Amino acid sequence: MFPVGKIAAVVGGRLIRGDATAPTRIVHDSRAVREGDLFVALRGRRVDGHTFLTDAFERGACGALVSNPSLVPDARNVIVVDDVLAALQRLAGAWRGSLGATIVGITGSNGKTTTRALLAHLLREDPAEATVFSAPKNYNTEIGLPLALLAMPPTASIGLFELGAERPGDIPPLADLLSPQIGLITSIGPSHLDGLRTVEAVATEKWALVERLPSDGLAVLNADSPHLRARLAETPCRCLTVGLEHGRIRGRIVREVPRLVVGVDDPPLRLDCPLIGRLNATNLLLAAGTAHQLGVPTEAIERRAQTFDPVPHRFQPVTAPFGTILDDTYNANPASTAGALRTLARLGGRQTRRVFVFGEMRDLGLDADRYHREILDLAVELNVDLIVPVGERATAACRERPSPSVALVEGGQVADAVRRFCQAGEEALVLVKGSRALELERLVDRLVGGGSSSQGPLRAPT
């Protein structure tokens, strides 16, 4: 990282008690501060980072970026600015300008994190290889993306980042900051509709990433999305289309369980990966196509796909005493939930009991009730044996459309109800899916009962 003096100059700040220190990392959570970090005192809706300045310096911070110097303890390398977030973004922009790496920006309604993790794995011969940087967690916001960029070492030759959008105008400044050479869009669907209102607006917002690619850049697109196919003529640069039904790289699902196997004719590929589900087949194709464009030989892509470690809480099979839980608790929207339900229906045998813990899908705007009704109707149509709603809108849909397969139970009794139902049969598959705010991963922990989180014994219908 730049020395604190240069950081102050880049952000237009006033440096108090400065020295020649170059921070090890840029950190905005005082609990994560280690010796040599620069602490960024951001003001949020609920907390003010200035409150934690003393804690940050006690943990070893070498300096801090602040807007209120009166709250700073007696410490060195304090950089004072009017707006800490704007300063953080300026610093990230300067750091991006110093990097000579190929940058990949990934956005979409579903699958961003899984696709990023897959691509990182396919690009690395060794999982610890430092030449490929993959952004931590899913740092994809106006705060997260600058922090992710600032964490990228100058020695990395490829950087992989996500861009998120909750309202119109979110993607353009993120794309301008990231300045990627490759833009990848995983999907377009109903997500963040409280801010974006319509699926067409979602598509327009995600497409802003492609619009900001350089003329010699590359757009990698899910061609199975009609919203993306309709925009292909507008692509300002070279374009690689990928899909199961459309696209330059066309995949076919050979097997869905216990591992996903996808075949491709051109380039010749057999992708055998410890994932499940049609949505993950598309994510795998997108990652493989991008890796091939970045120079990874097909034989290396095939070999590395076999050893991918699935991202926790994203359609992850987890062993439970009564069978297998499909832990898809990180988030939910109608497209991803419908895809997960269809996969649930295709798994197991004739005697398998299938359960859907139907978590509410947040941030769906004015049509939220309709989307919940449609998901319930799909679960009933697919003959899911037990549907247990969690959250206000999911419960309301189940009350409005009563079905013998629906069980309305109090929130604290969901685990017991699911466990009793599953233990009455020989084998059970339980899909747990809902929006992040519901924290349904806690329910998964209760169902597992402290057991292993290894991949469960999935099999195809017999």
Image (cartoon, rainbow, N blue to C red):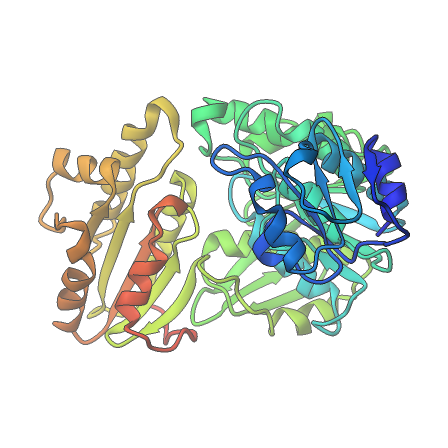
Q: Which residue occupies the foreground of this view, 218 or 247?
A: 218
* Residue 221 in view, yes or no: no
- Against 37, residue 129 (above or below) is below
Q: Which residue occupies the foreground of this view, 209 or 39?
A: 39
| Residue 134 placement (x, y as % from top left) | 69, 56
- Against 76, residue 107 (above or below) is above
Q: Is 359 on the left or on the right of 224, as rendered? A: left
Q: Is 410 on the left or on the right of 381, as rendered? A: left
Q: Is 250 on the left or on the right of 2, as rendered? A: left
Q: Which residue is depicted at the point 87% across and 49% down?
A: 2
| Residue 236 placement (x, y as % from top left) | 79, 29
| Residue 264 placement (x, y as % from top left) | 63, 59
Q: Which residue occupies the foreground of this view, 365 or 207?
A: 365
Q: Is 104 on the left or on the right of 349, as rendered? A: right
Q: Which residue is depicted at the point 60% across and 73% down?
A: 306
User: Which of the 4 quarters of the picture holds residue 65?
Assistant: top right
